[in-house]
Image: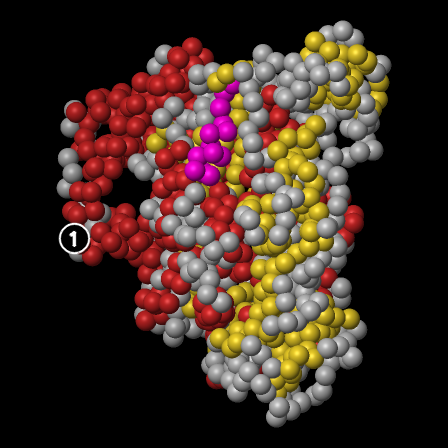
């Protein structure tokens, strides 16, 4: 029986202070019992001498300086692990909320994880087929990658994430099992419900682990949510050899929770009030993706974040972009013109793509087509800017060809139905046909031999 | 015994003690985590811990080591991969598996491996600091030269026979002036935050040849120089650094992955071990050392990684080698300073960065240089630091302060990267101050015309930049023919010369001679076209001949080892244009 401390000496936002405690370790978990019998958990965020500062995850509502009994559990925050977690629903702090009882744990693990040794990683190379042309061709998702979706409020990021989950052939030929881990941080009830329903409809619900911290749930608990989810992901991937796709939404709400916690601790704020360690903090989440030597499994992350005011330089998307291996950026203008998925091709990127495509993975001509599409679409944007000044009629013939190419590219390549699953062959052929709308000389990224073989203006005439 | 009083993230405080000295390395807690003293006052000693402090308790012991945070320097550094405080990651993997556990005490260098040592000192020799007393082949391409610790001098009283020794074996014994005998092994320690001494700085005179056209020709960097590569995410900073690490003509590369992605470090590891160094014919890893502190590793070690890297570089410089350091990225290092400064509750300056940020940045870059070493050899350290500006805004403190202390600035540009123009170095925003220092080298080793050509190419780009302002407003059709030609030639320069394909076997590295010849062809094309245009033939007619495309593709069509083909191309350009003239 460990010691219990009665009462608190200070309450400040989500933080409480205890005096005269002994043998407390940094980052240890505490259980706080209230007089009414309910209990909350928290953790030690600072100790100095006999004073301990605790962060209470469920918030400090109803706590007084007298009505609590605090017990130090002597271990960091842990998550019970077992393959039983598949199909279950947890709250943001990793407690089951689906009424099916506690997890019978095979083992427990510290939710903070430990840094993965770079020499133990193996470089991700296998591509994940998503069936979405713009992603497969231009920002290919690789197994073990972290590829966020940068979105804005009201854009169709959820629909896109669901389509990726449904169509992703993540464990196609290896015969291995796959699972989806879905962590919701501060999202609306309907959004969580939408994901749940979609998982049900596609019959994968038994392969999904859900962690729900909805927008009306305690904010500080949000800091735990992705860590619990990733602890489960690492366990399933590296000990049970499964391919895991982790969806984290919405990282902006997560970062705001970190900011709130930081300001209540009285820390010096950095950009837009976010603490100086936001980069390290986000990295401790995003870096928990990858493939390690000696294990068949993988952790692939698709974090979703909404850019406040659609501003890509806001600290959250900015720091995320520096850590993740590329990004899929959604664009409001495309969305308004009815393009789904509204992927802004130019700022989107997959850093791991170059080694996971080409012969043996997708197709030998993949990277040529991708580079040329990028280069040509960049010209489209220039031509459009010019057209908005001098009018489309005044453009040179080449610029007019670019304008036409841009229109067709958005209409036939980027746009697809939410249930349309295009094969990589279809996607690349489509790319070739679109490129054939342009004069041959404009295609300067492709070598001549390949160009002669594939350049087909007649196919291009079919677009209108 | 001193014990922990308080813990806040990586910062630990000890009360009521006078036992520690500033920057001393200490062991913290029962797990013996490594830390460093960063503040002392009459009440408290403040320590930053290089590992995760989870589970640490007040009352656990803190033990001083009696010396500052030091790097162990000796054979076994090359082709190794270390964390920020010089612990070999391979050994850590053996101890704790794929995930790094705290408190793993491992020695930096392999203590079992034997090196074939040749003793250079003789009994009776007077050795000064920096003198070489033994050599051994460290890798197939680098000879390791064991030098006397710069702070020691004395007479050799005993030497071992030539033979095989481990790093900790005694090979030479000296007697100092005070009469103490000191045993010399193959390795020594040096505090990482202190620069190693040398005899004198030499003027900068040689370029660091990288094989990247936009760098070597337009924005060159010198051996012993400093360069910054700022760019938002996705602009190819890391890619540029990788290319330089692979191809630049330094003897040894120190690659510091400071707060970057784990998968990227794995990629460097895999790629470098497969790549064959074009100059030595051996694996590239034989002359590379990697320091990896990925973004999820402890933040204090991230701060240390930069210093560890430069100390290793200076050590090899003292042996008479030319070293290039790639630091990716210095912004993460600055952020680590900010994070720790925040935990210390220091008064912040700009954007929360500590007021001493500029002095730390300048301390780092000032450790570059071309020097005469204590033992009379020539060596250099070149620093190429990536900067990741917040929100791609170059006016933020790290970029601005870095700009003050480097002489070469390669600004990466988002719009170039979007158009997949790599390396995405913007020629208008970037600069290099080394041109004058290097003029002699180019004159003597390439051609007297090299700098003239370079200037003309720059002028074409500048002129295009001006013309584009007009084109943006009214379109290119209304320009007079000679200006249309400038735009067309500038396109040839951009696509055919500045843009370089890192994945093409010839284009990934281009020797200076080919760079010079490529400029030559472009300028010939320009001059001849100007004559043709002056006779009233429109640019579009010339374009139909496919000459521009042909010149653009010369980087692929003419292999690096066949420069004679340039003559043929030049003749073709002239004849085609002459024919065109007569036709019209």
Q: Position of residue B74 (x, y in %)?
A: 71, 28
Q: Quadrant of the C terminus of chain A?
A: bottom left
In this view, which residue lies farthest toward the bottom? A36
Tell me what residue is drawn at x 62 percent, y 90 percent: A35
A343 displayed left or right of B67? left
10 Å crowding of disc 1: few (<14), some (14-19), many (20+) = some
Q: Nearer the viewer, residue A7 or B115?
A: A7
Answer whether residue A183 is magenta in the image: no
Which colour style is shown? secondary structure
Q: Which residue appears at 67% of the width and 19% of the height? A: B152
Q: Residue at horizontal 59%, vertical 29%?
A: B313
**Which one is in front, A41 or B574?**
A41
Relative image position of residue A413 (x, y in whole percent): 43, 62
Quadrant in which the N terminus of chain A appears? bottom right
Q: Could you say whether the residue bearing mark 1 is in a helix, strand or loop?
A: helix
Magenta stretch encompasses residue B361: yes
- The magenta segment is B359-371
Residue occupied by mark 1: A390
Q: In the displayed structure, would residue B450 be above or below residue B382?
A: above
The quadrant holding residue A407 is: bottom left
């Amino acid at each position: 029986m460990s010691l219990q401390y009665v009462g608190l000496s200070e309450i400040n936002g989500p933080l409480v202070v205890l005096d005269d405690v002994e043998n407390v370790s940094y980052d240890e978990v505490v259980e706080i019992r209230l007089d009414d019998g309910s209990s909350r958990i928290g953790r030690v965020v600072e100790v100095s001498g006999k004073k301990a500062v605790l962060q209470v995850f469920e918030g400090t509502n109803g706590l007084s300086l007298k009505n609590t009994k605090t017990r130090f559990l002597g271990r960091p925050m842990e998550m019970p692990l077992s393959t039983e977690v598949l199909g279950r629903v947890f709250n943001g702090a990793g407690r089951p909320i689906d009424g099916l009882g506690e997890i019978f744990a095979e083992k427990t693990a510290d939710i903070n994880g430990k840094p993965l040794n770079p020499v133990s990683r193996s470089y991700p190379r296998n591509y994940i087929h998503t069936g979405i042309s713009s992603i497969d061709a231009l920002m290919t998702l690789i197994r073990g990658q972290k590829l966020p979706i940068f979105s804005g409020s009201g854009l169709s990021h959820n629909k896109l994430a669901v389509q990726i989950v449904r169509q992703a052939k993540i464990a196609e030929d290896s015969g291995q099992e796959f699972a989806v881990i879905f962590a919701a941080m501060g999202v609306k009830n309907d959004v969580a419900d939408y994901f749940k329903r979609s998982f049900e409809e596609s019959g994968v619900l038994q392969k999904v682990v859900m962690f729900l911290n909805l927008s009306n749930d305690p904010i500080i608990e949000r800091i735990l949510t992705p860590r619990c989810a990733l602890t489960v992901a690492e366990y399933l991937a590296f000990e049970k050899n499964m391919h895991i796709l982790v969806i984290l939404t919405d990282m902006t709400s997560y970062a705001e929770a970190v900011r709130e916690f930081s300001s209540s601790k009285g820390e010096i704020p950095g950009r837009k009030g976010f603490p100086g360690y936001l980069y390290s903090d986000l990295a401790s989440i995003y870096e928990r993706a990858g493939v390690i030597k000696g294990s068949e499994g993988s952790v692939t992350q698709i974090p979703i974040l909404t850019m406040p005011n659609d501003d890509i330089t806001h600290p959250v998307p900015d720091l995320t972009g520096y850590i993740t291996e590329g990004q899929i950026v959604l664009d409001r203008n495309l969305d308004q013109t009815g393009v789904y998925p509204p992927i802004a091709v130019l700022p989107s990127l997959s850093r791991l793509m170059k080694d996971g495509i080409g012969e043996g993975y997708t197709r030998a001509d993949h990277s040529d087509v991708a580079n040329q599409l990028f280069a040509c679409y960049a010209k489209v944007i220039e031509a459009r800017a010019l057209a908005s000044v001098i009018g489309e009629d005044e453009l040179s013939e080449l610029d007019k060809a670019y304008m036409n190419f841009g229109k067709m590219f958005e209409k036939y390549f980027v746009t697809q139905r939410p249930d349309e699953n295009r094969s990589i062959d279809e996607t690349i052929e489509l790319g070739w046909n679109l490129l054939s709308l342009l004069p041959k000389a404009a295609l300067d990224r492709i070598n001549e031999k390949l160009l002669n073989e594939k350049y087909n203006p007649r196919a291009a005439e079919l677009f209108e | 015994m001193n014990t922990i009083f308080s813990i806040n993230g990586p910062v630990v405080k000890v009360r009521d003690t006078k036992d520690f000295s500033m920057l001393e390395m200490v062991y913290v807690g029962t797990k013996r985590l490594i830390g460093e003293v960063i503040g002392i006052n009459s009440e408290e000693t403040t320590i930053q811990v290089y590992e995760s402090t989870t589970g640490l308790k007040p009352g656990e012991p803190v033990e001083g080591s009696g010396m500052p945070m030091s790097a162990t320097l000796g054979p076994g550094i090359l082709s190794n991969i270390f964390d920020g405080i010089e612990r070999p990651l391979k050994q850590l993997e053996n101890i704790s598996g794929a995930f790094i556990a705290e408190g793993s005490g491992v020695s930096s260098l392999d203590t079992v491996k034997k090196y074939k040592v040749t003793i250079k000192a003789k009994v009776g020799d007077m050795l000064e600091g920096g003198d070489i007393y033994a050599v051994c082949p460290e890798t197939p391409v680098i000879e390791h030269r064991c030098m006397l610790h710069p702070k020691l001098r004395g007479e050799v009283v005993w030497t071992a026979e030539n033979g095989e020794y481990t790093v900790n074996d005694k090979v030479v014994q000296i007697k100092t002036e005070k009469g103490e005998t000191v045993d010399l092994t193959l390795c020594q320690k040096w505090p990482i935050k202190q620069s190693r001494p040398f005899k004198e700085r030499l003027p900068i005179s040689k370029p660091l040849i990288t094989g990247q056209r936009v760098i070597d020709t337009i924005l060159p960097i010198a051996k012993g120089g400093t360069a910054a590569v700022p760019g938002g995410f996705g602009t190819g900073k890391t890619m540029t650094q990788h290319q330089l690490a692979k191809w630049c003509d330094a003897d040894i590369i120190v690659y510091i992955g400071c707060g970057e992605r784990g998968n990227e470090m794995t990629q460097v590891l895999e790629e470098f071990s497969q790549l064959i160094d074009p100059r030595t014919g051996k694996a590239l890893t034989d002359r590379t050392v990697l320091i990896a502190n990925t973004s999820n590793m402890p933040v204090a070690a991230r701060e240390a990684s930069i210093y560890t890297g430069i100390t290793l570089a200076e050590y090899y410089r003292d042996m008479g080698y030319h070293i290039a350091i790639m630091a990716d990225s210095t912004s993460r290092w600055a952020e680590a300073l900010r994070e720790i400064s925040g935990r210390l509750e220091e008064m912040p300056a700009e954007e929360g960065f500590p007021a001493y940020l500029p002095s730390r940045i300048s301390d780092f870059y000032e450790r570059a240089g071309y020097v005469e070493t204590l033992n009379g050899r020539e060596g250099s350290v070149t620093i190429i630091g990536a900067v990741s500006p917040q929100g791609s805004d170059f006016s933020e403190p790290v970029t601005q302060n870095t700009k003050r202390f480097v002489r070469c600035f390669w600004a990466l540009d988002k719009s170039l990267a979007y158009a997949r123009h790599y390396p995405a170095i913007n020629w208008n925003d970037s600069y290099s101050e080394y041109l004058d220092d290097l003029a002699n080298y180019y004159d003597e080793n390439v051609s007297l015309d090299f700098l003239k050509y370079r200037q003309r190419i720059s002028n074409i780009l500048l002129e295009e930049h001006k013309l584009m302002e007009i084109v943006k407003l009214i379109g290119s059709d209304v320009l007079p023919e000679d200006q249309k030609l400038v735009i067309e030639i500038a396109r040839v320069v951009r696509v055919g010369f500045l843009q370089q394909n890192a994945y093409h076997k010839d284009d990934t590295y281009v020797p200076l001679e080919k760079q010079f010849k490529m400029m030559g062809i472009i300028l010939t094309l320009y001059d001849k076209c100007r004559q043709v245009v002056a006779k009233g033939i429109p640019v579009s007619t010339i374009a139909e001949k496919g000459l521009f495309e042909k010149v653009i593709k010369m980087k692929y069509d003419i292999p690096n080892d066949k420069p004679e083909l340039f003559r043929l191309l030049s003749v073709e350009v002239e004849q085609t244009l002459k024919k065109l003239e007569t036709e019209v």
